[in-house]
Image: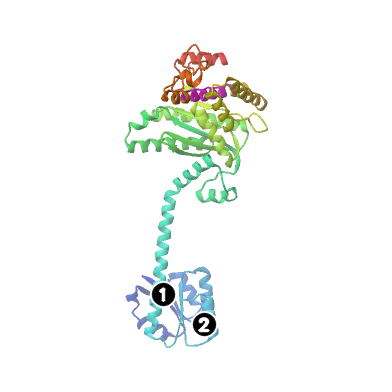
Amino acid sequence: MYKLIIVDDEPTVRFGLRSYFNWNDYGIEVVAEAEDGEEGPQAVERFLPDLILTDVRMLHMDGIAMVAEIRSRHPHIKIVFVSGHDDADYLKSALQVSAVDYIFKPVNMQELQTVVERVLHALQEEQTERRLIADMQEKLTQSMPLLREKFLMSVIRDGIPRPERIRERLDFLGLGSPLEASYWVILLRIDDSAEVIDKRTERDRQLLAYAILNICQELIGRFMKGYAFENQSGEYIGILYGSGEKEGLEDQLFLLAEEMRENLARWLKISVTIGVGERVNRLQALPQSYNRAREAADQKWYLGKNRIITMDSLETGDGDSYRFEPVQIERLNSALKAADLAAVMAELSDWFERLARNRRDGFRYGRIMSLELILLSNRSAAGAAYSHTRLGGTVDGAVGTNFSTGNDRRSKAAPGLSYDRSLPADPRETKRQGKECD
């Protein structure tokens, strides 16, 4: 039922409006009456009506002033003025306070019915709109975790295309991430994910994903600040940040990664490899850290599973650190596929020269970068061999007789590494070589 308050300084008018019109037929209940403009606002505060039927000229406070006061606190209430004065100034004032309608005394019941139907239609439309907005708000609230996840995925992959609006969007999504802070991206990948995930029912897969995220998010809150979400089946991303000394934050970061690995093994009986990206100073630089975390996690095919791997966990220079560039990778790929030894050596010389200039910790990072180069050469060799043999050629004809993919144990280039992205052919030999590098 809609609630109605009648305000008029004439008792007979109030009685007539209440008694001679069947309000119940329209779903309206007369909840109160007021005899002047001072009592009217008090009744409104008490009953919070949907509709007010009020005289214009009254003692103490006229209807125009009363409605202006009520409107300031309850703009949704519908107002219908009833007046015995056909005065243009009053009509103009009624319009200024957004009255729904204006009828004259003596009140004609047919005219009142028409006005009530019009007001009722407006009330029903507003009620429908409010219900729709409330329903949309509820659905928006329910989908907020998915919206946050979608946003964070777009940030790590594409950066922030419109930085001027990012603060507004972060507030809307309820993310407290500062625009500038020490940020890292970690990538957590389930080892042997096909065996771990594919054998489970869909329900068990969802429970596993929920449990992994729950453990990771709880640990993030304990060690640092940030968010965890599922990137794809068997792969999870952590966006971490903090303020304070860089060394202290990095200690916390690796403690967090180790706790994630150990807790997932203890409680869920799963092995994971965690790739740690490099530190960046701005939210919009997260793609750089994400790409490094992905590259680090990819090294498990050579370094082994159930590890925490970083391509370059410590920032070592004041300027920009040297990185692989897509153009350089393409040039090296072309040289490898063409078996052009001079071009390969020139490209490698350029890479390592830049590495020496831009990295204080060049040996440690160089060893990891060398693994990337081996991986790249193996992929190039495998691709060339596959394409050539499909055309009836041989592997030697595809990559040259002096080129080794690492499958030959006698080769001096990356012994024990194969280009099928499996584990090393002989883990003991790889371990021995790692000790020699150290």
The quadrant the C terminus occupies is top right
Position in image of residue 46 (x %, y %):
45, 70
> Magenta-highlighted stretch: main secondary structure?
helix
Q: Which residues are magenta?
A: 366-382
The quadrant the N terminus occupies is bottom left
Q: Amino acid at mark 2?
A: Leu
Q: CA distance from mark 1 to mark 2?
A: 18 Å
Position in image of residue 365 (x %, y %):
59, 24
**Which of the 4 image quadrants contains residue 78?**
bottom left
Q: Nearer the viewer, residue 387 or 67?
A: 387
Asked whether 432 falls inside the magenta stretch, the response is no
In the rendered image, the vertical position of residue 129 relative to residue 271, given as above or below: below
Q: How many marks?
A: 2
> Which mark identifies residue 91?
2
**Which of the 4 image quadrants contains residue 306?**
top left
- Residue that label 1 marks: 119
Q: Kindly state the secondary structure of the residue where label 2 is placed.
A: helix
Q: Residues within 10 Å of mark 2 (few under 14, many from 20)?
A: some
In the rendered image, the vertical position of residue 403 relative to residue 142, given as above or below: above
Q: Nearer the N terminus, badge 1 or badge 2?
A: 2
Position in image of residue 218 (x %, y %):
47, 37
